[in-house]
Amino acid sequence: MITASIVGVFLIGYAFIAMESTTRINKSAVALFMCVVCWVLYMLGAQDYLNLMHPSEFGEALSGMGDTTVSSLVSSFVADNVLIPHLGSTSETIFFLLGAMTVVEIVDSNGGFNFVKSWLTTRSKRKLLWAVVFITFFLSAVLDNLTTSLVMIAILRKLVPEHKDRIIYAAMVILAANAGGAFSPIGDVTTIMLWINGSITSLGVIEELFVPSVVSVVVPTLVLSLSLKGQLGGGDGKEAEEPVYLFTKAERNLLFIIGVGGLVFVPVFRHLTGLPPFMGVLLVLSLLWIVTEIHYMKIPGSPSSLHRVSELLRRVDFSTLLFFLGILMTVASLEEIGVLHSFGEWLDTASGGNSFIVTGIIGLVSAIVDNVPLVASCMGMYEIAGPAAGAEMAHFMVDGSFWQLLAFCAGTGGSILIIGSAAGVAVMGLEKISFGWYLKHVSWLALLGYFAGMVVYWLQLEFIFG
């Protein structure tokens, strides 16, 4: 009964998030409320859930409880061994997002991305679409899909003044960023997880997923480009006045190198230190902060204070950060009641162990549920098969079809709904794109590209890598 109630609250909450444009209730408020209610319901059956999901640890705690009451033991065990670990992993995402958003804001506010803007000079709607998709796709593979989306939205705001035009390009940024992140070991949180776990290798994931990822974004771009005609609004031959930057061109390039180059270095930092990625992002942020502060100290007067990091932090969308907090902690409650694990086991049984069916459905589910816990659950349910494993387990070997498809489907499947990926949520908040608009105009294109990419992967497996 409690499990059904938690799932029910989750579904109702997501319905309200999906209907934000209709209800006029901010999605962050709904996500936070949903999170708290789910965990309150969890506490009503906490002892049973702990026996189910943490049998050995909780059993050991019970055996040594002494004079402590069972209810007190359950409360302290949930706080120390369930909530705090989940909050820690959620905070990694939030601080990574906070750091990345601030780094992008610093570089952009001081003209660091001007050279990218100079590549996108066309006023043709169709040509600009292909250029934006191309740059986003490859930039996402080098950075990550979230950071790339933030960069491209900052650039689009300078290039496309009309909001009704800009949201079309913003939506394609989501598709291109998620597709670009899917074939790179450092392009998406889920591929990083699989890479660090040893399920995939850098060369293997690039070699086998590059073409399917390209197809997954080229197909929807091609279809959409057929309906785009004419020139962008505001193309009257007058260029928008270039803002006056307090940094020289060389200094702006230095900011770009420190900011974007630092974000590229984050996976290396993770490998060298063993620290989580958000620590690397905070390192990049701190370096940018120090460099800009030293520069501003040389400028007399107060105007420069408008561009200081302490002021730029005010522009960070904390509403989006709270939305992430609510969603990820709600999903954590579903993990702790065993729903995600049970769903995965049911999928495996119902599909007869077919990797394409299992990962395909996981990809579709990732359009609703965050792909990080889904991939984490799969990594917990399935072990990496060794070299001596039989042919029936070959798809679970390192760089096996299951792990490759999991990386592709979890990454690109998040594009089907705007709330299905970090990039989508961030763009949704920045450009005020409604769930309904995206569902009507973009979801079917993303779904078309998703299945096209899977077909191409199957063809590769049959005729090239098989």
Image (cartoon, helix red, strand yellow):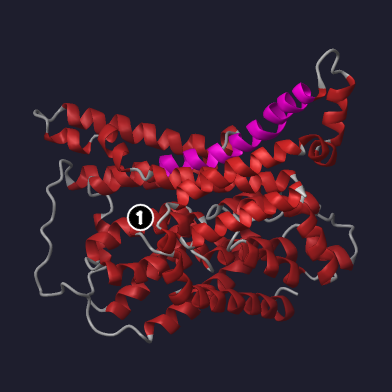
Horizontal side of residue 266 vs 248, given as left or right: right
- What residue is shown at x 31% (from left), y 45% (from top)? 105
Q: Main secondary structure of the magenta part?
A: helix
Residue 395 falls left or right of residue 6: right
The percent position of residue 75, horizontal first and vertical second, equals 72, 27
Q: Is residue 357 above or below residue 243?
A: below
Q: Would you say residue 74 sits in the magenta stretch?
A: yes
Horizontal side, residue 321 vs residue 250: left or right: right
Magenta span contains residue 443: no
Residue lying farthest to the top in this orientation: 67
Q: Secondary structure at mark 1?
A: helix
Which sits in the foreground, 195 or 362? 362
Q: Is residue 194 visible?
A: no
The region drawn magenta spans: 71-100
Above or below — where is 130 with respect to 380?
A: below
Residue placed under numbered mark 1 in the picture: 430
- Which residue shows up at 43% across the image and 76% down it? 441
